Amino acid sequence: MTSPDTIAAIASAPGRGAIGVIRVSGSKVPQVAAGILGALPAPRQARLLSFLDAHGRSLDEGLALYFPAPASYTGEHVLEIQGHGGALIVDLLLKRLLELGCRMARPGEFTERAFLNGKIDIAQAEAIADLIDAGSAAAARAAVRSMQGEFSARIADLKARITGLRAYVEAAIDFPNEEIDFLSGEALRERLAAIFAGFESITAAARQGAMLREGLQVVIAGRPNAGKSSLLNSLAGDDVAIVTHLPGTTRDVLRCQVHLDGLPVNLVDTAGLRTAVDLVEVEGVRRARNEIARADRVLYVLDCGAALDGAALGGAALEDRTAWAAELGQLPTGAAVTLVFNKIDLTGAPAQLNESSVPPRVFVSARTGAGLDLLRAHLKSSAGYRESESGALAARRRHLDALGRARQHVQIAADTLSSTRAFELFAEDLRLAQHALGEITGEFTSDDLLGEIFGSFCIGK
């Protein structure tokens, strides 16, 4: 499709710089180019030209590139001019383009037109935004793979497997007198097993990419003076939080991001959980509980000496302590919790990690750093993060949700096959699985979702 409007936008970063870039896309690009350049440049050749005002006077001088449709980023005629990067100069050039019949582009409209014109699918469009916003080299590599179509290709392969199975089943329904031997239970189970394996592979890669993009939300909670703020400072390697011996020093939520071998971890320090003594602390505790409810993992910090009453550090001794167990009972149901026994430097206890206990336990000293490597390793393993992200694909929560729904429909189809062999229901669940996978690449996409996706882009992209 071709939009009737020709759009223009500044594509370089705001402020003063060496080069200012402006993009134009739409059917009027040849006329616009003639107005600002004096003539339409040869396709895909950088030309040094003067940029002209309405009276033919030079506003600036720089490079101009013309990409005729459909061989352009948007699939429309595209003009890019690269002048000097002064804010005034770039603004004058943009105003001249508006005089020539362009309108200002909306955020993400260039990429939206690329999607609507079939140059990219929606997953690739999202990967472009993820590449721009990448906070680590690993996240950038995952975004590049998805931008180049690897994620979409794997979705298409999985959908093709489901389509093939559905086609055979529906053929059997339409032609019941024909002999289609694959409808034997064993043959169908083998095909379903291959589809489930495909789901496991792509979901693992997408989950890894989603972690690289969004990070792991880790909330540090516990009673006052357990060492929560000290733990935050030690993990961050900086004095992010104020630390004193006075209970209730932390009144608000403090945030800090660290990277663990490429995994972004969003650390959140919270007010100590207790019956508050003033209105400010009451609000701090309320905010702490809200953060705990949204956390991917809660590090519940305990003063090692107080929690164990000086007892031995064996498993039985821990189970006998009910004070902190009662505190954990107040956390949201289903919260992923790790007990962090802090201040082992004061008790003489060794640094150790026990991931098999429920909840997992790690013994550290925020003051000396003992055991922090064990805690970092635990955070990565509990999130399912692999340091080698060679297979990660840039993905978002909506992708994981769509994959989960698609897999659920295939599972329902498999259950139907084993219990009733109602092939009509079997085929319908496979169709629903196809539809869910199509949401990822934009085959089935609501206008509201498109607006949300492209509205998050910067103007000029």
Image: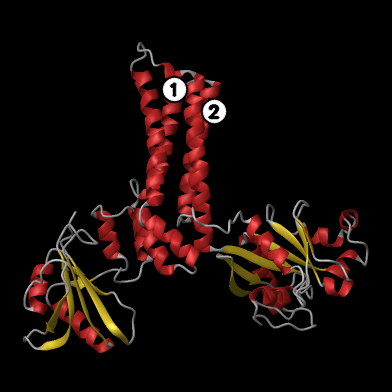
The residue singled out by tag 1 in the image is 423
What residue lies at 26% left-to-right and 64% top-to-bottom? Answer: 110
Name the spot of residue 305 as percent of width and height, x first.
Answer: 88, 69
- Vertical placement of residue 301 versus 190, above or below: below
Residue 448, image quadrant? bottom left
Judge from the rendering whether residue 443 lies leftward or rightward of residue 37; answer left or right.
right
Q: Residues within 10 Å of mark 2 (few under 14, many from 20)?
A: few
**Amino acid at pointer 1:** Phe
Q: How is the image coloured?
A: secondary structure
At label 2, the amino acid type is Asp
Question: In the figure, is residue 397 to the left or right of 66?
Answer: right
Q: Which residue is denoted by mark 2 in the rendering?
A: 415
Q: Is residue 108 above or below residue 186?
A: below
Q: Earlier in the sequence, mark 2 or mark 1?
A: 2
**Front-most of residues 435 and 329:** 435
Numbered circle sitting on residue 201: none
Residue 449 in view in this figure: no
For residue 71, side relative to residue 115 (left or right):
left
Q: Residue at x 45, y 59 (%)?
A: 142
Residue 220 spot, x, y in % from top left:
69, 68
Asked whether 263 or 166 is in front, the reply is 263
CA distance separating discs 2 and 1 = 11 Å
Name the residue at 37% across, 14% down: 176
- Front residue of 345/331: it is 345
Q: Secondary structure at mark 1?
A: helix
